[in-house]
Image (spheres, coloured by chain):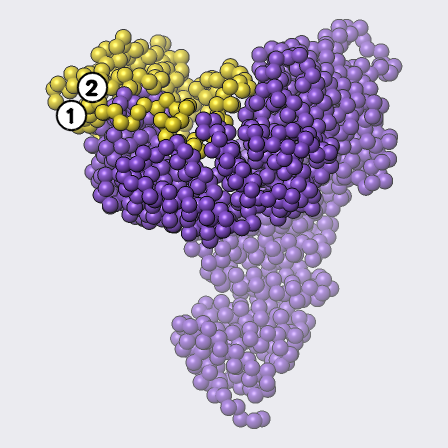
Amino acid sequence: MVESIHNVPTLISQYIATVDTDDQIANAYTEQLAELIVEDELSLLEFIQSLGPTLTSDTDALRSKSMHCLTSTLEHLNGSPKLSRQDINVIIDFLLSKLDDKASLQWVLSSLQSLVGFKNFNPGLNQNLKRLLNAILSDYDPKKNLAKIRYESFAILKNVLLTQKDYLLIHQDISDTYVKAFIHIASGEKDPRNLLVSFHLNSSINKTLVFDPNNDLHGEFVTDLFDVSFCYFPISFTPPANDPYKITADQLKSELRSTIASQSLFAKDSFSSLIEKLTSTNPTIRNDVLKTLQLCVESYSNETVEEYWLTLWNALKFEILHNDVSIFKPQLNEIIPEDYESSIEDSDDNKALILTLVIISTLFEKLDGTTKQIQATIINDLKDNLVSVKEKSQQSILILSAIASQSTYAFDQVIEFVFSYNNWGKYINVENNSIEVTPQPQEEDKNDELILNVSKQRDLVDNLGFIFTAYKVLYSKLGSGEADEFAARNQLTQFKDHLLIFMGQLLTASSNLEKTLKCKVVQQLTKLSSLPKYLSQNENELILGYFKDIIVDTIEKKSDNWEKDIVLKEVTTGVINIIDNDHKVDLAIELIITPLLNLLDEKEELIIYTKIINIIGDLCINYRILEVLSIRLLNKLIAINHSVVPIDKKINLFVIIIESFTSWIVKIETNKQFLTNSWYQNFVPKFLDNVFHLLAVKEDYVLIELSGDLVGLIIKFIDKSHHQDILNDFVKIFFTSESSTPLISYKENVLETPTAAVALLNKVLSSIDKSTQFKEVSVNETVDNAIEVIYSIPDDEFLRIQYLQTTSLLVNKFGTDDSIVSEKLSELLTTFKSLSADDKLTKKLYISFETLIWILKALVIRVSTEGFVHLNKLVGLLTSTPNLEVKQLIGKSLMILFIDIKIFTNQTPGVKQIISKVSNLNIKLLYKQRIFEIILPELIKGQSNKGEHSEVYLNSLSTILKNLPKNILVSHMAAIFPLVLTSLSLPKSKTSSDILKSTLSTLSTIIKEDQSTVEPHLTKLIPTLLTLATGKIVYEKKLINTEEVRILAFQNLILIFQRYEGLSKYKKVALMSLVPGLDDRRRNVRKLCCDLRQILYELD
Amino acid sequence: MSDPINANPTIIDVANLPTRIGNNGANSVDGYGKKSKQDELLEKVLSLSLLTPEFSRTSSLPDASTVPDLVSDVEMESSTDDELVDEIDEESLLQQAAEAEEEDLIDEQEIFDLIATISDPEHPLTLAQLAVVNLHDIKVTHGANKYTDISEVLIRITPTITHCSLATLIGLGIRVRLERSLPPRFRIRILIKEGTHQSENQVNKQLNDKERVAAACENDQLLSVISQMLSSCK
């Protein structure tokens, strides 16, 4: 043998020296030792010899560390075959003799654990395994050792079972000893980590080894194995704060549960003990017990479960029968909610109900062969509860439904039983086929029972619901062939007519005051209709017919608030369900929607008209219906146009229909997008025709606005490829006097005759894809013409602003050459620049300025270079102009650049990745940020100039902030805050409630986002806010701090006192000065004042 | 308080407590008055106009160049004897402007809302949930003139059991809460509802005796219990 380059004794002593301080380094040494052995450079004998002196040392610590070194080396050898059988024999002998050495016991056990796994460990040779197990039994006492040492003993047994399973199975005596050893070490264990191993090992033993129930010794084993696990039940454990093993109560619970369920032979003890624990009042324990029972029923052998099912049934039925079962909802589609495990807390009593039903279902499923007998027993037990509708009926039906949803056989049995004449058959008019003669005296009772009062009718209907649920659950459980078979010949089919007639009668014949009963019937009729392959077309029609009658009756009764009637709501939900789940759309359109549309009479009151439209809207849940409605409503519009009602009413009806219809399109598009290509031909022309027809009589702004919204929306969802044509069409319609396109006829040229219809055009232009261009007409000319129109209508503000928007849109989306508009802007700017301090602005100049700012808006929102050049000039002019009027005008105008108006914003924000691929807005994302960064410094500069017009800048800032997204504001807070402070303390001749409102809301944003900016100014800020909140600031007989201002001031104060520390010095003063606030005229303000005072009182 | 005497009181669900929400406006039909819609649209569009009032047809704002009235802000820290006189003067001056605002009178529901969320000292529940305070047991009487006459709030509380030893503490809690939350013109009277407590008269006396209430509020320990009760106030 080659002399080792390693010095073995050195490695050993280094290990011993470091093992206490640094595991990792120490480990490296034993790793080297193991390597030496593997590479034959060191024999085991030599190694032991080198260890010798320390291994036999008198010092406990040294001996223990030396043993540790041996353990660690063995571990690193990892079962290597380099250790011969003889080697292993020798070490085992040595180790077994060391079991009485307390100091090194942990390592002795750990070494043994490693050795068992060695390739050359032979359990039979020298009776190694037997000796090992016996030694544990006799020489090792778990009660005298610490948890970590006890852990090693479990590890040995675990490893034995893992590696020597086959040997144990062959040698009965050894396996008996093994079980004895396990029971020995597992008894009295308390440490959670060891318990986890113990439970696991216990289950493994039960699953691996076979126990003979007729063998007394084995009987004893089973009892003992059960005892060492069940004695912990129900386990409760709160992990200590610094638990290194991170063991949770759930782990322990589920491990214990599976242990109890791992051995069918446990049944005789487990079921009775568990049922006994079910009497606990603590829901967590009861749920634990039930979950364990459930696992037992699932895992125990069929024979065992069959033996004990009656015991279980007798115990479990009371869980359901004697409890309130209102958590089970008859209108749902399942009896046992799929996610009950996670969605209901273990501490919830209701979970016990669900778990019980789960167990009963599992029992039933498991014992398929014997179900007939079981079913008979169960039915027999519940019989009394179902003779009439009474207290325990619902509970019984729940159990029966749970069973019925398990198999077709069970289902039929349950149905036959429930609907037999003696039970509920009599209520739904099933013929009495029973030949048995009922004794006379009881006859009277029967008659009494036959008549149900309303609350019993309600219960009965609910209970029927559970049966229907069982049908649904069972159907979805079956394979497709089976399901068809089931649908064709289940017992429920023969009661179909009875059920429909019974519920139909309840619906139509019972008093209108019995709203809950009717709702319940509606729920169950809906459910019947949703049962797969149950009802025929005719029967579905019947149900929808009932529903229609309810809707129509409710509407025609015209009581107050009929739209809030709960039966009506239930019907609506029902119809939606029927349409949504079962594609019975055509039926619903024919039977529900058409009659509703027929009720829309133009002579009807507006309010009722609206309510009916809203019901239709609720039912409009898919494209099919929407399309039908588009045609029908268009016809309505035509009818309204030709009717004799006054013009105002016509307009109102148009507005109602158009507004609702627009919202339905948005609803469907948000849900599931569709293209509106065909609508452009089929809907838009007729629609516009009708709208123009009405507008010719009376120009109504709202109607124009809403029609524009609708047409714009439709255009937006037309495929992008058609957009150029659409643009051409509309340019022709509106910008030329040519009387018409083939599609739409509109005679006016909006550029020659100012008309409000231009608002509609704006919506259309806004919705058209930005890649389109003006073809036959020049954009620049159009813009010029539009501006001319603007000058021509100085007195019609509404119209002027519409045309300003048109101009802006044209420049923004269709402008091809910015230099032309740029020239225009320069010209205008020069005019304003040349004005001296004394010049008075004419109206024309104001209008010119409006044109300027709207064109500028068109440029800056698409971040055009020209736009920024002019913006810079404009803000420059703001500070430099000597003319106060111009200064005020510019200050006021800046908000136009920030404001979001409809034509420049996305009107369908819920729709992502629009299906038509249209991109209609020509707006850059960050434009607000960029222009704000240009404007803000000028405002700050202007305001701090000590000029007397600082309020112009503050006013301007406040209108901008109103339209500025928060994220932009956040990055400029430090710069804005001083302006906020100045704004709040402006003299009242210069302030206004608008300035205060926007300043205060800015302030609250700043406080929320960045407290450090505000903190140094609190001394000044708090009194100012207190004055605003509780004082009365009046200027020219107008209240400046209006309710809104006071509320904002209070909200800021509350924020401040909640967010900042060390404000107790203000407590007394603030409380005093808040007293007037308690008597504020507005309740909302008083409330905030009380809240603030409560916060102040809690300060210390 | 470690051993609750009445461990099993009837509890009212929070959702079933009386509330102001839903009572207002429930009857007003949301009519499609197009007038308002039209106004709304006009207002929105016209807010974009840059014309000054003198050029604008629609605006009726007062001219900005008139001389302001000489009216000063409310004095915040006046505590002199003639405070009352001052305030009345000021009020009369300001009244005109303030009158423009509609007044919500302090009513029973408002009082109920103030005290409903006080916690019971021995249950983790509020007084309203335990039906210690009930809306119909609250009575607000307004003085003829808000600024000169005294107004009164009368509350009858129903202890959960007739020998409830904490009735006085609950009463005191309510009193403190109301004194902190109501304007000083209100006199607060708290009575035990007839026939709901063994020593009704004693408790009533104790609760409405100024001296004894003041003395109780000097007691730090008592005050901290009350703070605890009030900390759940919303």
Q: Residue at x 55, y 75 (%)?
A: A76
- Report the chain holding disc 1: B
Q: Residue A903 at what x, y percent from top left? A: 54, 38
- Quarter of the image with the N terminus of chain A in it: bottom right
Q: Residue at x 47, y 33 (%)?
A: A791
Q: Nearer the viewer's eye, disc 1 or disc 2?
A: 2
Chain for colour yellow: B
Pick the residue in front: A819 or A938. A819
Tell me: residue A439, above or below residue A190. above
Q: Which residue is mark 2?
A: B90
Residue farthest left in this picture: B81
Q: Which residue is mark 1?
A: B78
Q: Residue A990 at what x, y percent from top left? A: 27, 32
Tell me: residue A850, above or below residue A861. above
Q: Amino acid at mark 1?
A: Ser
Residue A424 - label: none
SS type, badge 2: helix
Residue farthest bottom in this picture: A2
Callout 1: 10 Å neighbours few (<14), some, many (20+)?
Answer: few
Q: Residue at x 48, y 79 (%)?
A: A29
Q: Colour of chain A?
A: purple
Q: Quadrant of residue B229?
A: top left
